[in-house]
Image (cartoon, rainbow, N blue to C red):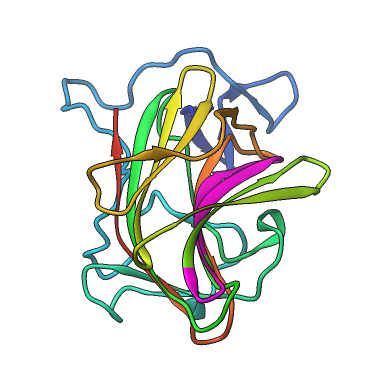
């Protein structure tokens, strides 16, 4: 859970919370006065993204130290380009673009397009944690197919192929309900959606809660363009 604690400087070092019985060490407070008096408009952190800026929004973080070779915002203006990285289990893939679950219940829809050079190239969207579930588009025998992958906490993964789509573009949707219950849906036209797989419970990661993540893997030169990722209540 994200929360605020007061901080003050003590001999050049930050002391967070309130002073404790141990000199120089703070302890959390349950409540604290606002640092500035008065009324202010309610603010909320950024969540979805139209990818029309010059930089990724502050809601995003990479699964590892970022690398500028993983993505571009100017290759196709108004869209996020994810350059395909060598395939590995998503839990150990550094080039996953993630953000924390923005609410206990929400909807998420992403519009994306895969430019695949060989079979196995893919783009995925899912929930990332100690156990990860994702779905997306994969080139199979030269055709665009939906794919669903489930990876347990022990690292073992299983997958199933879904329907063939008319093209290498799709709308992917997550429905998250109370208790972090997640369902995957997809659409070729953005109007008629089909559920893929059974709903499941998202799991938290180490030191963070559950996250949603985007990634692309495959041959060098392959990539995926993400037009937008929108969050709804």
> Seen from this angle, which residue lies furthest top?
30
Residue 163 as seen in the image, left or right of residue 79: right
Residue that appears at 32% across and 39% down? 45
- Viewer-proximal residue, 102 or 20? 102
Magenta segment: 123-143
Q: Quadrant of residue 164?
A: bottom left
210 vs 81: above or below: above
Q: Quadrant of residue 73?
A: bottom left
Question: Can residue 56 be seen?
Answer: no
> Seen from this angle, which residue lies furthest right?
154
Residue 40 as seen in the image, left or right of residue 97: left
Question: Can residue 225 be seen?
Answer: yes
Give how far across and how far down residue 6 sits, in percent: 47, 28
The quadrant of the picture occupied by the N terminus is top right
91 vs 86: above or below: above
Residue that appears at 33% across and 44% down? 109
The quadrant of the picture occupied by the C terminus is top left
Give how far across and how far down residue 84 sits, in percent: 53, 75
86 vs 5: above or below: below
Give how far across and how far down residue 15 sits, in percent: 58, 35
Residue 144 included in the magenta stretch of the image: no
Q: How many marks?
A: 0
119 vs 197: above or below: below
Residue that appears at 78% across and 40% down? 153
Give how far across and how far down residue 122 sits, in percent: 53, 67
- Viewer-proximal residue, 136 or 11? 136
């Amino acid at each position: 859970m994200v929360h605020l604690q007061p901080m003050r400087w003590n001999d050049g070092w930050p002391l967070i919370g309130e002073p404790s019985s141990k000199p120089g060490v703070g302890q959390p407070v349950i409540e604290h006065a606002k640092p500035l008096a008065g009324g202010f408009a309610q603010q909320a952190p950024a969540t979805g993204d139209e990818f029309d800026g010059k930089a990724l929004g502050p809601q995003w973080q990479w699964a590892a130290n970022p690398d500028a070779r993983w993505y571009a915002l100017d290759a196709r203006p108004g869209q996020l380009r994810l350059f395909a990285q060598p395939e590995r289990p998503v839990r150990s893939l550094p080039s996953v673009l993630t953000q924390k679950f923005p609410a206990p219940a929400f909807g998420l829809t992403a519009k994306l397009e895969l430019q695949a050079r060989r079979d196995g190239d893919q783009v995925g969207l899912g929930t990332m944690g100690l156990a990860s579930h994702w779905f997306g588009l994969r080139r199979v025998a030269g055709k665009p197919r939906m794919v669903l992958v489930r990876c347990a906490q022990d690292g073992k993964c299983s997958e199933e192929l879904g329907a063939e789509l008319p093209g290498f573009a799709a709308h992917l949707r997550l429905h998250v309900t109370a208790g972090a219950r997640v369902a995957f849906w997809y659409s070729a036209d953005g109007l008629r959606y089909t559920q893929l797989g059974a709903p499941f419970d998202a799991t938290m990661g180490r030191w963070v809660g559950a996250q949603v993540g985007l990634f692309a893997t495959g041959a060098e030169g392959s990539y995926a363009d993400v037009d937008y990722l929108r969050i709804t209540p």
